[in-house]
């Protein structure tokens, strides 16, 4: 792996952990459970995460 790609993977991992922690904190304070939507697995994880992280309008 190139250093740039490795750093990008690290940033994606950190972002996913933060999003997960925020979701768990938010769902624990709600009466109804939040459903986590999973994107279908693709070869390029970076492309999948950037497109699936946008909030629906």
Image (cartoon, rainbow, N blue to C red):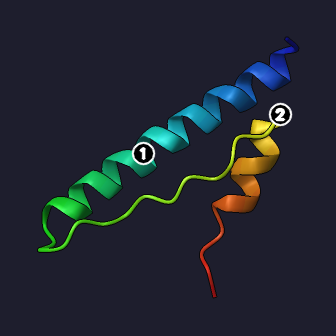
Q: Name the residue nearer the viewer: 53 or 14.
A: 53
The circle drawn on residue 43 is: 2
Q: Residues within 10 Å of mark 2 (few under 14, many from 20)?
A: few
The circle drawn on residue 47 is: none
Give residue 34's quadrant in the image: bottom left
Residue 4 pos. (x, y %): 83, 24
Decide if residue 20 is on the left or right side of residue 28.
Answer: right
Secondary structure under the numbered disc 2 in the rendered image: loop
Look at mark 1 in the image and give the residue it sits on.
Answer: 18
Q: Tell me the CA gap for discs 1 and 2.
A: 23 Å
Residue 15 pos. (x, y %): 53, 43
Residue at image position (75%, 19%) is 6
Question: Mark 2 or mark 1, which is nearer the start of the sequence?
Answer: 1
Q: Residues within 10 Å of mark 1 (few under 14, many from 20)?
A: few
* Comparing labels 1 and 2, the label whose residue is closer to the camera: 2
Residue at image position (42%, 45%) is 18
Seen as rendered, the residue at the extreme front is: 40
Q: Name the residue nearer the viewer: 55 or 34.
A: 34
Seen as rendered, the residue at the extreme bottom is: 57
Position of residue 57 relative to residue 11, above or below, is below
Decide if residue 29 is on the left or right side of residue 51.
Answer: left
Secondary structure under the numbered disc 1 in the rendered image: helix
Give residue 26's quadrant in the image: bottom left
Residue 21 pos. (x, y %): 32, 46
Residue at image position (51%, 42%) is 16
Residue at image position (33%, 55%) is 22
Does the residue at mark 1 contact the one at mark 2 (Cβ under 8 Å)? no
Q: Which quadrant holds the N terminus? A: top right
Q: Which quadrant holds the C terminus? A: bottom right
């Amino acid at each position: 792996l190139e250093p740039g790609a490795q750093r990008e993977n690290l940033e994606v991992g950190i972002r996913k952990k933060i999003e997960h922690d925020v979701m768990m904190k938010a769902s624990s304070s709600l009466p109804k459970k939040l459903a986590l939507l999973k994107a279908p697995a693709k070869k390029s994880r970076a492309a999948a995460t950037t497109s699936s992280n946008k909030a629906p309008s």
